[in-house]
């Protein structure tokens, strides 16, 4: 049996090897400042692969044994990772490296591959797209009893069933799940909506926030905070008592995003909070650590080697972009083109702040349901201050749209992106700004297959020519909210038809689509994924909202 002392010794050995440059790759690790992680409670304490079997993870990632980095960190150790690391160090001596064939043999002997999602259904050729989505739910649903991959897996066990996106994504993701829930609601699967909201509440209670996804390597960062809209969606069906039930978790979610706000002054930042020179408090994505993401380890090490920036700085901005959900996009790049110029932590995103406005409004409503008028008024005042700040700080008057704000330089960015629809979707905008934004969406973002993500084609997946289901839904909802019915229906109709055409050709629903020349999307750090949770949810909801458009 391996003791905790053996584990610490193995990890110290890894750190020594890193500093000595003996591991494969040898680039981009010098001068890193690794911030301590917030360890989960002992009852759920599993270590991320970069901590539990780090030397092996690094070697496998840098050797490119698998098509993408997520395949590496989703490997399931067959025995105590500390013992695997000790054997690996012995195997590699005295050369300090190991050939790819021997490395693959070592991995095959000590790890099981991640389970794959099954999304190719045995259906009749003329199965409608709506029936296909309903038929997919059981294939994408995971029961807690069926997801135990053993004590050393990176998968975080959840108390209730949940729906995964599909393909390489075999865990529950944060913001994906809200849009998946829209389709579950349309399928009258409120049992699963209820279970998933409960799972997110459990994550907040367990870790103090909702992680990016339910893997240990995601436990240092969150994603766009959609817990409040999830609670609202469930409350529409189950009644206002839902707000009372999840009030504690809504408060903890708010505390997480606002942590450090009382410790900073004008022109300063702490974690997710920034105070501008005039005292305005707004939020940014942060990502917590200054270290390569385990699931993107090799790519980020190689990027750091090509950059003349401090590696720790680069890694921090990359993690912040991953927390944004837009990984990656020209939005975050100083030159609008290259990841080496990424500056996510310097940017206040309009969409994040619109979501936090919604969270504060939801908290005000929850306190009213609870019967505490004073607390309800406090959070309503917070929401109104944020609404005023969004309409002042993020508004580009010359172009007539919302954009991001570089808080270090004190200026708006020139990013024209689909993030501009968030203030409409959550009721932040006044009518004049909503009208101008609608005109900009039509002029700059509307394409043959729906709404494009940005106006730049960089090869990144959150740029042109790609369109994404959640952004289409937010645009349709926001435009409809402010009376721009025709544009809302145009986006919905074009998006539905893009989905239908790809389904007719391939029998699949996929993660992202090319909306310029409607087809399967591309770009990014992995191949296009089919399944696909949020595409299914958004499509089913839009078909129900626009039945005439859906059958043209």
Image (spheres, grey):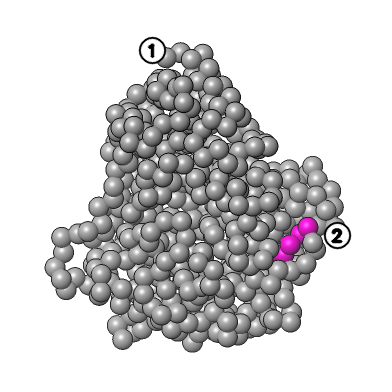
Please name the residue shown 49% across and 77% down the image: 451
Kindly identify which residue carries mark 2: 278
Q: Do we see residue 366 in this rendering?
A: no
Magenta range? 404-408
Whether residue 261 sits left or right of residue 139 in the image: it is right
Q: Residues within 10 Å of mark 1 (few under 14, many from 20)?
A: few
* Main secondary structure of the magenta stretch: loop
Please name the residue shown 36% across and 70% down the image: 520
Residue 532 lies, with reference to residue 503, above or below; the image says: above
Please name the residue shown 85% across and 59% down the image: 278
Q: CA distance from mark 2 to mark 1?
A: 59 Å
Disc marking residue 1:
1
Secondary structure category for the residue under label 1: loop
Please name the residue shown 34% across and 32% down the image: 102
Q: Do we see residue 126 in this rendering?
A: yes
Whether residue 281 sits left or right of residue 298 in the image: it is right
Residue in the foreground of this view, choosing between 118 and 14 = 14
Residue 355 lies, with reference to residue 550, above or below; the image says: above
């Amino acid at each position: 049996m391996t003791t905790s002392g053996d584990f610490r010794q193995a990890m110290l050995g890894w750190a020594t090897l890193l500093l000595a440059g003996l591991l494969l790759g040898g680039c981009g690790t010098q001068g890193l400042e690794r911030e301590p992680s917030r360890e989960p409670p002992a009852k759920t304490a599993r270590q991320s692969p970069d901590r539990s079997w780090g030397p092996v993870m690094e070697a496998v990632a840098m050797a490119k044994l698998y098509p993408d980095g997520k395949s590496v960190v989703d490997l399931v150790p067959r025995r105590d990772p500390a013992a695997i690391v000790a054997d690996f160090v012995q195997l590699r001596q005295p050369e300090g490296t190991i050939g790819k064939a021997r490395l693959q043999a070592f991995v095959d002997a000590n790890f099981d591959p991640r389970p794959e999602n099954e999304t190719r259904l045995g259906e009749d050729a003329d199965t409608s797209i709506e029936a296909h989505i309903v038929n997919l739910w059981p294939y994408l649903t995971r029961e807690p009893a069926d997801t135990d991959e053993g004590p050393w897996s990176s998968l975080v066990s959840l108390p209730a069933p949940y729906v995964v996106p599909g393909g390489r994504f075999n865990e529950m993701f944060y913001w994906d799940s809200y849009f998946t829930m829209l389709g579950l609601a349309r399928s009258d699967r409120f049992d699963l909506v209820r279970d998933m909201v409960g799972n997110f509440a459990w994550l907040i209670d367990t870790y103090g926030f909702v992680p990016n996804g339910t893997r240990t390597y995601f436990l240092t960062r969150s994603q766009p905070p959609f817990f409040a809209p999830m609670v609202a969606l469930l409350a529409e069906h189950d009644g206002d008592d839902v707000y009372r039930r999840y009030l504690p978790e809504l408060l903890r979610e708010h505390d997480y995003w606002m942590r450090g706000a009382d410790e900073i002054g004008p022109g300063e930042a702490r974690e997710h909070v920034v105070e501008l020179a005039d005292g305005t408090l707004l939020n940014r994505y942060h990502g917590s650590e200054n270290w390569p993401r385990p699931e993107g380890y090799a790519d980020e090490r190689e990027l750091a080697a090509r950059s003349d920036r401090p590696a720790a700085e680069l890694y921090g901005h990359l993690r912040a972009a991953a927390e944004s959900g837009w990984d990656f996009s020209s939005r975050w790049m100083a030159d609008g083109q290259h990841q080496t110029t990424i500056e996510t932590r310097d940017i206040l995103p309009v969409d994040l702040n619109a979501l936090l406005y919604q969270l504060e409004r939801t908290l005000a409503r929850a306190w009213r349901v609870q019967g505490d008028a004073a607390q309800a008024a406090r959070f309503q005042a917070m929401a109104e201050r944020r609404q005023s700040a969004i309409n002042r700080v993020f508004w580009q008057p010359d172009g007539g749209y919302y954009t991001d704000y570089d808080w270090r330089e004190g200026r708006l960015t020139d990013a024209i992106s689909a993030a501009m629809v968030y203030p409409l979707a959550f009721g932040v905008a006044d009518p004049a700004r909503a009208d101008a934004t609608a005109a900009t969406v039509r002029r700059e973002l509307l394409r043959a297959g729906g709404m494009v993500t940005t106006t730049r084609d960089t090869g990144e997946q959150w740029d042109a020519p790609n369109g994404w289901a959640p952004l289409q839904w937010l645009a349709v909802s926001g435009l409809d909210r402010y009376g721009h019915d025709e544009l809302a229906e145009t986006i919905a109709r074009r998006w539905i038809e893009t989905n239908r055409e790809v389904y007719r050709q391939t029998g699949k629903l996929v993660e992202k689509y090319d909306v310029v020349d409607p087809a399967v999307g591309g770009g990014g750090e992995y191949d296009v994924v089919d399944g696909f949770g949020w595409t299914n949810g958004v499509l089913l909801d839009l078909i129900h909202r626009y039945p005439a458009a859906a059958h043209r």
